[in-house]
Image: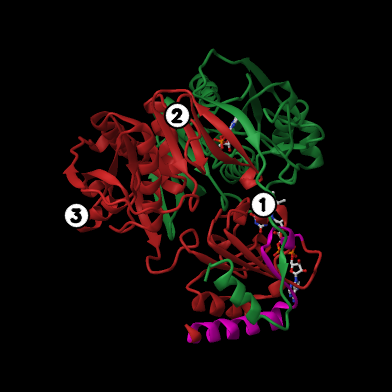
Amino acid sequence: MIKILVCISNVPDTTTKIKFTNNNKTLDNTGTQWIINPWDELALTRAIEMKEAAPGAVQSVTVAHVGLADSEPTIRKALAMGADDAIRVNATANDSYSVAVQLSEVVKNNSFDIILCGIESSDYNNSTVGGMLSEILGIPSVSSVSNVTLEGDQVKLKREIDGGFETISVSNPFVAIVQKGIAKEPRIPSMRGIMSARTKTLQVLEGIQTEELVEYVDFVLPSAKSSCKKIDPENVKELINLLHNEAKVI
Amino acid sequence: MSVLVYTENWDGKFKKLTFELISYANEIAKKLNVDVTALSIGDVSDEELQKLGKYGAKKVLSVKDARLKNLENNAYTSIVSKAVVTENASVIVLSNNYTGKALAPRLSVRLKAGLASGVVELPSNIEPFVIKKKLFSGKAFANVCVKTPLKVLTLFQNSFEIKISDNNLSIQNLSVEINDSDIKTSILDVNKQTNKLLLTDADIVVSGGRGMKGPENWWAIEELATLLDAATACSRPVSDEGWRTHEEHTGQTGKVIAPNLYIACGISGAIQHIAGVSSSKCIVAINKDPEAPIFEVADYGIVGDVMTVLPELINSVKEFKNSI
Ligand SMILES: Cc1cc2nc3c(=O)[nH]c(=O)nc-3n(C[C@H](O)[C@H](O)[C@H](O)COP(=O)(O)OP(=O)(O)OC[C@H]3O[C@@H](n4cnc5c(N)ncnc54)[C@H](O)[C@@H]3O)c2cc1C
Ligand SMILES: Nc1ncnc2c1ncn2[C@@H]1O[C@H](COP(=O)(O)O)[C@@H](O)[C@H]1O
């Protein structure tokens, strides 16, 4: 029986206005709505679909998160969507390497067969944790995966490449780093799901000592864009003129 | 010491992105007073490899192994690691594309090297090593300090100017012992178009949103794109509706692109859409609603109906092309 792990990160809602405090050294999270990272939400949706489609083949879907107690509402949402149980590693997630180390301990202690990570966290856009986790564990990784299917105990992955797709087979355990396409729409928790989430197991583990390889020094906002130059719809030629002579892009 | 660049090839050829990467690595190498070595995996002709010298590479290490035609994360990581050792590299540069994103994290762990991904500039400081990267899909940047002696960087596409810097290039074969057991994944099938201009490579992109009303009007987007040698893109609802394929959808959950010119037709400019296109050098918006948020990020805007503006625009481009 296959055990699936979905690694979820907790990120500000994608419409959040970005602000900093403490001399631009810290993100200002006042009023921020936190959500499951959109790719992780899709990954979890796919994992649940796989279990529903093949209850005899998939034993369980677990979610894991590295973070402090304030991210528990996000983990509960994952349980409400349909994950069977959850693990939170109690550690601050400052750098991808340390997060991957913490997650690797979770995998080692639970022998998961399929590990799903998102292609990137929508806040730091790192695209690193999944690959790092696979390397720490010494298992295969397949990235930019847009489909995972089970055919008996064989796993088939569809990976996007420049200009097309590859179909890949890989043996368990492995890490699939997933992107759009993996599920159509994120699953919306049902009322029953929300009720049962309260009683599902959310195990809290203490993080191990680990090192950090990078450190965020400070943050910067992009320089303000000059305002939009409006062109009269009756005079479209003027646009071509500007693109050629002013912007020099055609 | 050296700066090592992983130069990906597409059916034996390099792209603009490769030359951008070498130019970038060359500037870092100058700061460090070392040379640039490029690593190429796959079947690339010497003639093609020679091109890398033009942008500053001093040496190319070429690994030709028929089993490595397609990306295999574990085996490729072994090869790059070997090159890092033979070249005594202190910085490894990859592109922040599918391949770079797949390899950089594995390299980071295997070599205990801090990784800064999606970097957009040269390091602002070498000791300590501080570099600027993109966050929140371009809504912010961070200065990241890479604390390890060896650094891995992935460069965000189209963020560095290509520079010619002629060098006498030497080509060497690198032999790396790859056992079948190092190859952990097997490719059952490849399905790709090789002749089509890729959205992520295009200098110009013409994109349509729900304001285009339906697939029957897409001929205008395609005609304009053909005239401008552009690729076509769309907003997410357009691909969700099945008007266009999912490979064309740009934004937060789709492709992130950085062309020189992005023309948005009937796209409202939702924050999740902008996340994928905000790095474009120049944005043109055509939208009938003067309050549409797309105008906040556009450089040039036409407030009007795409049904009438696009045909006009197509004619103007034709006239322009005839005049030059
Ligand atoms: C988690 C999440 C992730 C998302 N990811 C993405 C993503 O990656 N990419 C993405 O695109 N969206 C994404 N979205 C959806 C996004 O929020 C918007 O809904 C979407 O971008 C809107 O697409 P649109 O501009 O084509 O359509 P609309 O918002 O419907 O806008 C149509 C525009 O066309 C204009 N228009 C109508 N008729 C005409 C006409 N005749 N002539 C000229 N203009 C006309 C209208 O004024 C309007 O501004 C995401 C949403 C969420 C919640
Ligand atoms: N703190 C975290 N806890 C658990 N998983 C995480 C965490 N951060 C990142 N991940 C996983 O790694 C993926 C890529 O994130 P990143 O490398 O931060 O861009 C995410 O989509 C998650 O699957």
Residue that mark 1 sits on: A185
**Which element type, helix, strand or loop, lies under badge 2?**
loop
- For the colour red, the matching chain is B
Callouts 2 and 3 close, C-beta under 8 Å: no
Residue that mark 3 sits on: B46
Q: Quadrant of ligand 1?
A: bottom right
Q: How is the image coloured?
A: by chain
Mark 2 surroundings: few (<14), some (14-19) or many (≥20) residues within 10 A: some
Residue A226 within the magenta-colored segment of the rendering: no
Q: Which mark is residue A47?
A: none
Chain letter of disc 3?
B
Q: In the rendered structure, which disc, 2 or 3, sits on the residue that comes first in sequence?
A: 3
Picture quadrant of residue B219: bottom right
Of badges 1 and 2, nearer the viewer stands 2
**Which element type, helix, strand or loop, lies under badge 3?**
helix
Mark 1 surroundings: few (<14), some (14-19) or many (≥20) residues within 10 A: few
Picture quadrant of residue A56: top right
Tell me which amino acid carries mark 1.
Glu
